[in-house]
Amino acid sequence: MTTNAPLAVTYIGGPTALLEYAGLRILLDPTFDEPGDYPADELTKTAGPGLPASAIEPVDLVLLSHHAHADNFDAAGKQIALQTSVVLSTPEAQAELGAPVIGMAPWQTHQVGVAQVTALPGLHGPRILKRLIGPVIGFLLQAPNEPTIFVSGDNSSLRLIRKSVRRLGTAEIAFLFAGAARVPPLPLALTLTSPKAARAAKVLGANKVVGLHVEDWAHFSESRADLESAFAKAGIADRLMATPRSVRVSLRD
């Protein structure tokens, strides 16, 4: 049984999307700056958001996989987040940003309205780079009479996704951050590659997948087309949803 509450996604750009779930408007990894360079992170943003921040308000909850890199949390995104009632992120984000950020360790839960959010473990690239790159978490959303939703954040580890499934079960809908982000001189992918994202969808048992983190930043080494190709090769092309920029897409069957 489902409720009459909206269940929809609006893709905004990069890792950023607005999720309507269990009566909440949930913003994922807010990035709303216009194109430009970020010398501190050695990153370049190549396209602006599909919608301005004013178009997605009000926001009830921000799920922030990590705060340390501009491609997941730029200046305009930070401004929006800190005006929101609740931001769930890492303990490091809470220590640096303060309220309204609530830091969560893996497997901790937080209730927002009727939705329960569980923090999931993540690795932003290979374990050997953890101290250099910093922490990242994912999220599992559950609510009465609603599908379970998995949000990977910038986690690149299939092992940790399998661990989450063993502990908490599968998810009908998955938001997967792909793009195989690579930052010179490191040759290693810091987010899911396209083939890994397809495997993650199978591990999660997700029948709907929203692909994020595949465009708008120069260091994303794989595109939306690469993601679509990988899902097709894995025989699950029908699971990857079409989410045109700035278009509200229903997640109901």
Image (cartoon, rainbow, N blue to C red):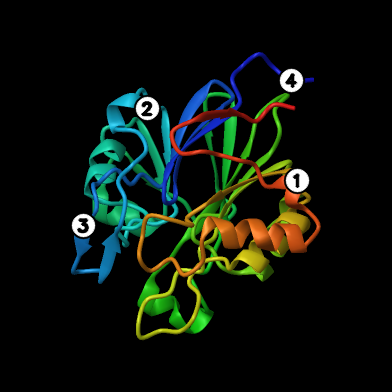
Circle 3 or circle 4, nearest the eye = 3
In this rendering, the answer to whether 4 lies above or below 60 is: above
Mark 1 Cα-neighbour bin, 10 Å: few <14, some 14–19, many ≥20 = few
Tell me where residue 111 appears, x and y as whole percent: 53, 33
* Cβ atoms at labels 4 and 2 below 8 Å apart: no
In this rendering, the answer to whether 229 lies above or below 50 is: below
Question: Which residue in the protein does label 3 denote?
Answer: 36
> Disc 1 on helix, strand or loop?
helix
Question: Which residue in the protein does label 4 denote?
Answer: 2
Distance Cα–Cα, label 3 vs label 4: 43 Å
Tell me where residue 36 sits by quadrant. Answer: bottom left
Distance Cα–Cα, label 4 vs label 2: 24 Å
What's the mark number on residue 238? Answer: 1
> Disc 4 on helix, strand or loop?
loop
Mark 4 Cα-neighbour bin, 10 Å: few <14, some 14–19, many ≥20 = few
Mark 3 Cα-neighbour bin, 10 Å: few <14, some 14–19, many ≥20 = few
Q: In the rendered view, does 252 fall on the left or right side of 49?
A: right
| Of callouts 4 and 2, the N-terminal one | 4
Residue at the (64%, 61%) spot, across then down: 197
Circle 2 or circle 3, nearest the eye = 3
Quarter of the image with the C terminus in it = top right
In this rendering, the answer to whether 217 lies above or below 61 is: below
| Of callouts 3 and 4, the N-terminal one | 4
What's the mark number on residue 56? Answer: 2
Tell me where residue 67 appears, x and y as whole percent: 33, 56
Circle 3: residue type: Gly
Distance Cα–Cα, label 2 vs label 3: 22 Å
Which of 187 and 146 lies nearest the eye of the viewer?
A: 187
Tell me where residue 70 sits by quadrant. Answer: bottom left
Residue 172 seen in the figure? yes
Circle 1: residue type: Asp
